[in-house]
Amino acid sequence: MTEERAGMTAADLEREVGHPGELWDELQRRVQDEAITQFSRVETDWLALMWSIDAFRIAGIPPRGMGRAEIEAAPRLAAIYRTKGNWFATLIALLLQNRTHQRIQPRTNVRGFSQMHQIDVAWPIREEDPLICAETKVTGAPAYGRTPVRSAIADFSNRRKELKFAATDLKLFRRQQETSITHWGVWRENAPPKTYFLWAARLKTEGTRSPDNINRLVAEATALSNSYLDGTGLVAWRANALGGGYEAVELPAAARVTDLDDVLYRIQSEISLLLGPAGQTPPPVVPRERAVAVRELAPDYGDDAL
């Protein structure tokens, strides 16, 4: 995806790489109509979707019918491009819903110990005391215009801090002022909610300077699982040798971080164990006194919630 596409129209580009909005609609339809439960079954569809939206971003052309037509092309395209994160969260929610036969809703507001968080995937769907929380993230982007290629681990030190804070703040909700937690590892493994990170990453391979290394991503994800989270899953891709699409990158065999399907299976298993004998959802455990009146704080969820 380079200068070869200079001067192309939206229609030309659509014939070559598909329409990202239509590819996304078809991907959702497949997952729902075929009751798909594994990301591996739709991985090719996801990579085609990412290839399509990246091609439009590189060309500087908003896809047909997407975004507000009265907005100039550059900000309109930027807004459209940001939806890929919501697409991934929704896809994960749909796969989990098919696995568990529970209602799973992406982007839920949840109350923590000190503030509100916008959770990408949460179960049960309630503002207080969900039992499963997962952050999803799509990182990495190709160069476009004068903007250089963005690494899959760009600014990840801030992302790491946000994930750790959110996981801890959510787990402290039940305790409030009772913050004696004994051994850290034992407490975080047993305190609800279970917290997970599902990471989709485009690896930077362009040029010879500092290409992304899958081992670096695995190290980052493993550090989160070893210190604060209950599990991390990773899917990564890069441009293929022919430059005509994306290909998946295999995780190292010895990596503690697992693929997305293993983490989805783990979350499914956790939900099965938490359901009552008749399939009922456990009621929330809500403290009578609160350390912080979080509803009185400014609602600034941003992208920093787990």
Image (cartoon, rainbow, N blue to C red):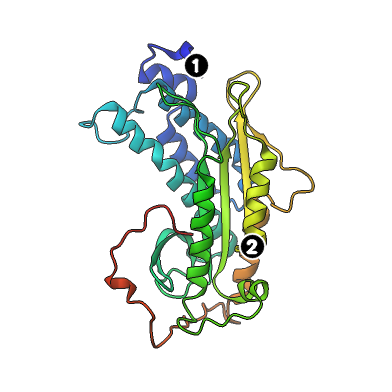
Label 1: few (<14), some or many (≥20) within 10 Å? Answer: few
Q: Secondary structure at mark 2?
A: helix
The numbered mark at residue 98 is: none
Q: Position of residue 100 (x, y in %)?
A: 58, 64
**In the displayed structure, does residue 26 sit left or right of residue 47?**
left
**Front-lying residue, 201 or 94:** 201
Up/down of 117 relative to 203, above or below: below
Q: Quadrant of residue 112?
A: bottom left
The amino acid type of the residue labelled 1 equals: Thr
Residue 113 in view (yes/no): yes
**Front-lying residue, 75 or 16:** 75
**In the displayed structure, does residue 100 sit left or right of residue 262?**
left
Q: Position of residue 114 (x, y in %)?
A: 40, 71
Which numbered disc flags the more N-terminal residue, 1 or 2?
Answer: 1
The numbered mark at residue 2 is: 1
Up/down of 186 relative to 259, above or below: below
Distance, label 1 to label 2, CA atoms, is 41 Å
Q: Quadrant of residue 195?
A: bottom right
Image point (60%, 36%), residue name: 44
Image point (54%, 71%), residue name: 193
